Structures are given as C-alpha cells and as structure tokens.
Image (tube, rainbow, N blue to C red):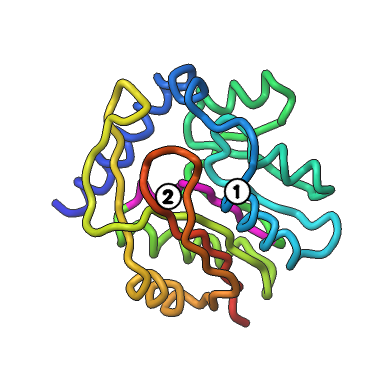
Amino acid sequence: MIMRMQEDTNAETLEAYESGVADYNAVAIPEVTGSLKTWVDAGLAMLPPGAHILELGSGHGRDAKYMASRGFDVEPTDAAQAFVDYLNQNGQHARLLNALTDDYGGPYDMVYAGAVLVHFTTQETGDVLQKVKSALQPDGLFSFSVKIGEGSGWSDAKLKARRFFTYWQEKPLRELLASNGFSVVFWEEGTTGHNNGEWYHVVARREA
C-alpha cells in the first residue's frame, strides 16, 4: 500500500509537468539571482574548473544555462519528456532521466537538483540520496533545495494540475543526509523570488 501511494504521487506530479510546460515557463524566474545565486555560486566555488555536473529536473533550463556560462560541463535532464523536448529545442541537449527509477551514470563532480526533492516522499528522498551518492566522485557534491515546512500535501499553484510536495525541517533533513553518507558544507535559508515560502539551499559532500 505504501509503495503504491509513493508511485502514484510521483506519477501524477510528472503528469502535471508534462502538460504544464507553457504555464510553468510563463511564471518561471528567468535569471539566477538573490539567495538562489548565492547558493549556486557557493557550490560551484567548491568544484575544479570545468567540472562535470549532472542536473536533475532541469525544467526550463535556467540553472543549467547559468552553470554552463561559468565554464562547467553541465548535463541537463528531466523526468518529463515535455521539458526534455523544450530543452533540446532550445539547444541544451538534455536527456530523459527519472531520479527515482533511472541510472544516473557518472561519476560526476556534482549532482544538482533545484526544487526537485520537494516532490518526493521522505523514503523516496533517502532512495535518491543513495542514487546520487553512487553517481558522484568520492568527494563529489550534491547541491539541492527543499521547501521549509512540515508534512506533505498537494498544490495546484502555478500549474493547472496538482503536484505533490514534501516539506522539511532542518534537524530531520540533516539527519537524513548524515545517515546516507553526506556531510553538509553549505546551508542557507532563502527564497526563490516567488511568493511560495522559504527554502533550504544545501550543498553536501559525499563522505569517503
């Protein structure tokens, strides 16, 4: 029963993105600025020049484009075919990748997931952390963001279809990272520029 519930939440969320590319892009913030930029830059500063980055959930491609402009080798991916098509049509050479079920490849110097883990249950987030760990170099970085709050639920904000969200508090998130072999090297509370609450912006290093 629990496994069926997890599969259904992710499947329905992906369906919302498959049909919502235009709606999402219409409200997406076009530039990497503010606390978002502070976090992204903090992670990039810990990488060697030209480092290889896998992005999960690239969406409209803003973050991948920014990181590539800084000289990094970025591989955009998304679990929604509609966004993969959009990215490829705009010259970003993306591939379809479901963070829950697919092999990530690698090894990468960083896995980046902006506003992706928000759509997974707590158990699924732990599973993703293990997949990220397997895809990273021994001292590689995982840069990600999650919404601050408690519990989980559905929202139809920004799109015409509902999406599943899990909200986090600092202590359990840090504990989950530690139990999956990651040490936090950057932690910030910030916003995305939307009126949609506060976020944790995190960079964690894979422990040897």
Answer left or right for 85 relative to 50. Answer: left
Q: Which residue is mark 1?
A: 34
Residue 177 lies, in percent from the top left, at 45, 72
* Dots 1, 2 in contact, CB < 8 A: no
Residue 32 lies, in percent from the top left, at 64, 42
Q: Quadrant of residue 184?
A: bottom right
Kind of residue at disc 2: Leu
Q: Which residue is mark 2?
A: 100
Q: Is 199 placed above or below 84 here?
A: below
Which sits in the foreground, 98 or 47?
A: 47
> What's the magenta region?
110-120
Which sits in the foreground, 198 or 44?
A: 198
Q: Is 183 placed above or below 137 here?
A: below
CA distance separating discs 1 and 2? 30 Å
- Check the image and name the residue furthest to the left: 1
| Residue plotted at (70% across, 56% down) | 41
The stretch drawn in magenta includes residue 179: no
Disc 1 is placed on an element classified as helix
Residue 108 appears in the picture as rendered: no
| Residue plotted at (26% across, 41% down) | 9
| N-terminal label among 1 and 2 | 1
- Check the image and name the residue furthest to the bottom: 208
Answer left or right for 10 relative to 96. Answer: left
Mark 1 residue crowding within 10 angstroms, few (<14) / some (14–19) / many (20+) = few
